[in-house]
Image (spheres, rainbow, N blue to C red):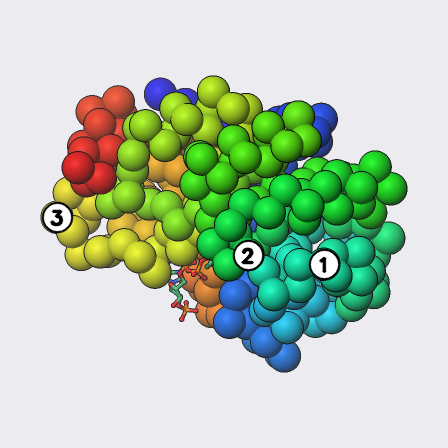
Amino acid sequence: MTTRTNQETVDLADGVSIPLIGFGTWQLTGDDAYNGVRGALEIGYRHIDTATMYRNEDRVGAAIRDSGAGRENVFITTKLPPGNVGRERQTLDDSLKALGVDFVDLWLVHWPPNGEARPETWKAFIEALEQGKTRAIGVSNYSLAQIDELISATGRAPALNQIPWNPFRYDAKEVAGLQSRHVVLEGYSPLLNSDLGNPVLTEIAAAHGKSAAQVILRWHVEHGFVVIPRSKRRERIEENFAIFDFELTPEEMRQLDELGK
Ligand SMILES: NC(=O)c1ccc[n+]([C@@H]2O[C@H](COP(=O)([O-])OP(=O)(O)OC[C@H]3O[C@@H](n4cnc5c(N)ncnc54)[C@H](OP(=O)(O)O)[C@@H]3O)[C@@H](O)[C@H]2O)c1
């Protein structure tokens, strides 16, 4: 069994620690983005996931500032839209301006541009890291082969790969492939892509007096996968963070892993 605390972090190869649980902000704009992030920070989240494409960086930045949590205590991720290749530096500067910060904690290539690895974009990411505009760099939606292309072109692996993930997508080979390259696995859409009514999930949830969503999120953190659930409802933002007062048994973890087969 793995005891975890709600501020537990995973070390990235860049020497930076990322909180295992974060708050996702896709499709949250305007007041939903502001109130969602304010609520999440009040509840205790210290990691916020945004992207240029989400068009909410200004509201996310305002919420972080107004929360009083302190910039240094909040891990901020943003992402380069694939269509902005060749304009990496400008895009990051625009993100920093919108967020109202001097640096982000993690900058990701949102998708492989045109389905390609694009080492020249990765070189621009390394430059941004060296300039201190981001504390760590990574990718999203990259295959292991594409990650290898980046490594062979630059000698530097992405610190993290943000990919669609949940027990129904569990793939031990993917996990091992990322681990062997020292790339941390961050899962997205943990709830959206899951069948919350699946009996394996609901039985485990009932045994712990928790919801199916909480079991899914707990499964991530027990595996050491970073996870970033999103909700625009305060009670669910709270529910999704209330996963540190129970533990899944090895047998339950095995049953959940099996959903991926
Ligand atoms: N890198 C990428 O390409 C990529 C792609 C997609 C997502 N992401 C990131 O990952 C984050 C999470 O993924 P996501 O937003 O796609 O989906 P998600 O967090 O898996 O699910 C969000 C949906 O689940 C509902 N929900 C939230 N908590 C719930 C609960 N406890 N019980 C039942 N339903 C619940 C939400 O509805 P309510 O709002 O009504 O509660 C919303 O419809 C995103 O916000 C974004 O930051 C990245």
Q: Is residue 29 above or below residue 246?
A: below
Q: Position of residue 43 (x, y in %)?
A: 58, 54
Name the residue located 86 percent from the left edge and 53 percent from the top edge.
102
Q: Which residue is mark 2?
A: 113
Please rate how many residues cluster around mark 1, counting C-alpha atoms within 10 Å: few if below 14, some from 14 to 19, many from 20: few
What quarter of the picture does the N terminus occupy?
top left
In which quadrant will I find the C terminus? top left
Q: Of callouts 1 and 2, which one flags the residue occurring earlier in the amino acid sequence? A: 1
* Image position of 216 with respect to 224: above or below: below
- Near mark 2 (Cα within 10 A), the count class, few <14, some 14-19 or many ≥20, is some
In this view, 229 is above or below 124: below
Q: Earlier in the sequence, mark 3 or mark 1?
A: 1
| N-terminal label among 3 and 2 | 2
Report which residue position mark 3 lands on.
199
- In three-dimensional space, the C-alpha distance between marks 3 and 1, rounded to whole angstroms, equals 48 Å
What type is the residue that disc 1 sits on? Gly
Left/right placement of residue 15 relative to residue 172 reads right
Quote the CA–CA distance across marks 3 and 2: 39 Å
- x, y percentage for residue 101? 83, 57
- According to the picture, the residue beneath numbered tag 1 turns out to be 86
